[in-house]
Amino acid sequence: MLPKFLTHGGPMIWVILFASAVAVAVFIERVLHYHRAQINSMEFLNGVRNVLKRENLVEALSICDATPGPVARLVKVAILNRDRGRDGVREALEEAGLVEVPPLEEKLNLLATIAQIAPLLGLLGTALGFIRVFSQLEGQGTLATVQQFSGGVWEALICTAAGLAVAIPCYAGYNYLVSRVNAIVLDMEKAATEIVNIVTELPKPA
């Protein structure tokens, strides 16, 4: 069935397939990225708190460096700015958060764009298919047979279906990735609040 679709889908089917391949690559890359970025923030903070209670700042920083994800990097920023007081630590965390969020949202716009334009690509393929049909009808007149213009109808229907088949999972995938980003950002906010309390309770460096 697939070879038949590719044969009768016209030139636009290849554009739609390319868009779908890009969407799949982006989705897989983002899922892997978010999997690495999201950690058990409470467990991580408890470990850092225990180390800081022993006033072992070097080990706490080493734990942050060894842990992937934006939460660990925010905690490291808070530890490094602990001597600035509560307001100073919060300000440093806000600045660090502004740096951490854009990489999380990277490439999501591309997936959303594919979800939006895939039906339009299908519609364009449909229009081209019907243009082909009417061109053949005009050339053959009343002598035209179903077989002579069935190719154009095939092209129109296949492109419409392909455009929707790409757009629907792309849109669902985009919403799923956005929910993952929101979950990570929420973890960052909770961790930032917690680490402010932790580092401001430490004795200030001499």
Image: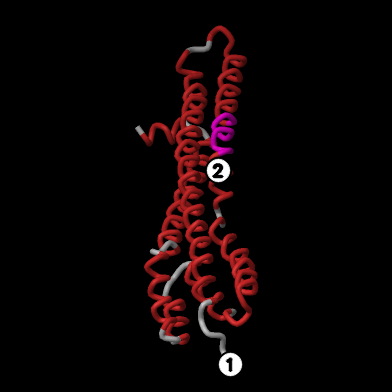
The residue under label 2 is: 114
Give the residue at x 53% y 59%.
104
Residue 169 is left or right of residue 192, and the answer is left
**Residue 25, position as x, y percentages in the image:** 46, 53
Give the residue at x 42% y 79%.
63
Residues rendered magenta in the picture:
116-124
Residue in the foreground of this view, choosing between 132 and 14:
14
Give the total of numbered labels: 2
**Residue 18, position as x, y percentages in the image:** 50, 46
Disc 2 packing (10 Å; few <14; some 14–19; many ≥20): many
Can you say whether 172 is above or below 122 in the image? below
**Residue 121, position as x, y percentages in the image:** 57, 35
Q: Secondary structure at mark 1?
A: loop
Which callout, 1 or 2, points at the residue further toward the start of the chain?
2
Q: CA distance from mark 1 to mark 2?
A: 56 Å
Give the residue at x 57% y 60%.
101
Disc 1 packing (10 Å; few <14; some 14–19; many ≥20): few
Residue 156 is left or right of residue 49, and the answer is right
- Residue 92, quarter of picture: bottom right
> For the residue marked with disc 1, what is the amino acid?
Ala
> For the residue marked with disc 2, what is the amino acid?
Ile
Q: Secondary structure at mark 2?
A: helix
The residue under label 1 is: 206
Residue in the foreground of this view, choosing between 55 and 25:
55
Q: Is residue 35 found inside the magenta-colored segment of the image? A: no
Can you say whether 175 is above or below 149 in the image? below
